[in-house]
Amino acid sequence: MADPVSLAVSTVIFALRPHPSTRLPVLWVPLVRRIRDPHQGKWALPGGPLGASEGLAASAGRTLRETTRLTPRYLEQLYAFGSLDRAPSAAERTVSVVYWALVRSEEADASLESVNVRWFVADELPELAFDHSLIVEYALWRLRNKVEYSRIAAAFLGEAFTLAELRAVHEAVLRRRLDPANFRRQMEASGRLVPTGEYRAGGRHRPAQLFRHDESIHLADNGPLTGL
Amino acid sequence: MADPVSLAVSTVIFALRPHPSTRLPVLWVPLVRRIRDPHQGKWALPGGPLGASEGLAASAGRTLRETTRLTPRYLEQLYAFGSLDRAPSAAERTVSVVYWALVRSEEADASLESVNVRWFVADELPELAFDHSLIVEYALWRLRNKVEYSRIAAAFLGEAFTLAELRAVHEAVLRRRLDPANFRRQMEASGRLVPTGEYRAGGRHRPAQLFRHDESIHLADNGPLTGL
DNA sequence: GACCTTATGGTCGCGATGACCCGAACACGG
DNA sequence: CCGTGTTCGGGTCATCGCGACCATAAGGTC
């Protein structure tokens, strides 16, 4: 007897880009337009059925690459959604294992859009297909929580960065201004930053020192699952 | 074409009972002996395939009832495990959505054991089937984290309880003595406790006031998913 | 009634945090 | 080439939460 429940993997992909009106950096999410029922025409999270010979995270990474041509800088499982009422009753019963990912802003600019793939401001989404609106809301909640006690913000930046750049990431994610002096002290106290000794000049102000992250520390501590 | 990946739901069930040697309360977990290959004879988490017309949480609650005859006081999704190598290659590819649950200690004593169902001290488990050892380790990590910032400890207690009883739950979960005065202040500051005005006498000491929990506050704040 | 045990309340020092201040060092404009 | 505006980077200070510790309250036991 065939398994009556099908299994899919979807991914909430976050990138930082300027808001179209305010020009301030905000979170963006790529969505895919559904080309068939149910919910034809609505926007949905990228994803698809789990391949027979790929792991869950591998499947998330694959659909991420297929829709954005990007490589995730951070990838974490979000939740498994399997209520009976998450799709119209006529549709097939599907359990979705959802991941969330962070990609680099500069790379996101270069990524392709099309009629059926488009980036949206994460906090200004249209109504999505299925329960995907709730899923994105939950992913945003997780990201905003996690940025405060881990170093995942590094995933949005390159190898070396100034404290102002790192602070801009935190401010964009948390939608709140942070005091530069206090932010510096917090980062230095965390022990996750390594000063490079180099400085970045160019602005009409004093040059800022460049830092990099201590690579021996994981982006996030997920306890016994950290290695996976 | 039949879905090549099968979907199962397992549950890590925690109860508090005295340790066989020390008599101090510790966490216990019920396990089921596997009666067929792979891993025949080894102990494993209770669970089974997801029914076609039940939600994920409902499936977890059902197997919990089937193995322990108990009703969960708290139930939360832990993680979805789907690596390719989690079962011997000869076996069927299975993705497991794992939940963790808390049940009341007194009820746990009354629950049935059998040759194939047995309770174990959570920190002294034998080697389990599949990746279930890792799963229990992760569930313990989640529980120990969550008990510090939520009121899930209440799930182990009855309607009314003294601060000493609540503290004993925290101490058993965290495996660490807590200062009675500081614990009291922390609980009172959290605003989750409601004094009943009644007192429990009987010990060879001053009677302790009984408290109950503010039912309007969820056992744990899981953000947008709290209601589910 | 002496004494033991736990309940409950208070103090104190420390570390983290947030609000705020200020000199340092660059770019730019005149 | 100097004034001005900017951010950098270092400092102060009040507050808060927490753990360590002390003290008194009020039962039980003998």
Image (tube, coloured by chain):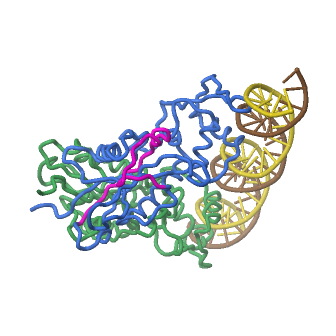
Chain colours: A blue, B green, C yellow, D brown
The picture places residue A209, in percent across and down from the top left corner, at 65, 28
Q: What quarter of the picture does the N terminus of chain B occupy? A: bottom left
The picture places residue B108, in percent across and down from the top left corner, at 34, 66
In the rendered structure, the answer to whether residue A35 lies left or right of residue D24 reads left
Please say whether residue B79 is visible from this viewpoint.
Answer: no
B95 and B65: which one is in front?
B95
In percent of the image, x 63 and y 66: which residue is there? B188
In percent of the image, x 64 and y 27: which residue is there? A200
Please say whether residue A43 is visible from this viewpoint.
Answer: yes
Quarter holding residue C15: top right
Q: Is residue A97 magenta?
A: yes
D17 and B93: which one is in front?
B93
The picture places residue D17, in percent across and down from the top left corner, at 66, 55
Q: Which residues are magenta?
A: A93-120
Q: What quarter of the picture does the C terminus of chain B occupy? A: bottom left
Quarter holding residue B209: bottom right
In percent of the image, x 28 and y 72: which residue is there? A88
A17 and D27: which one is in front?
A17
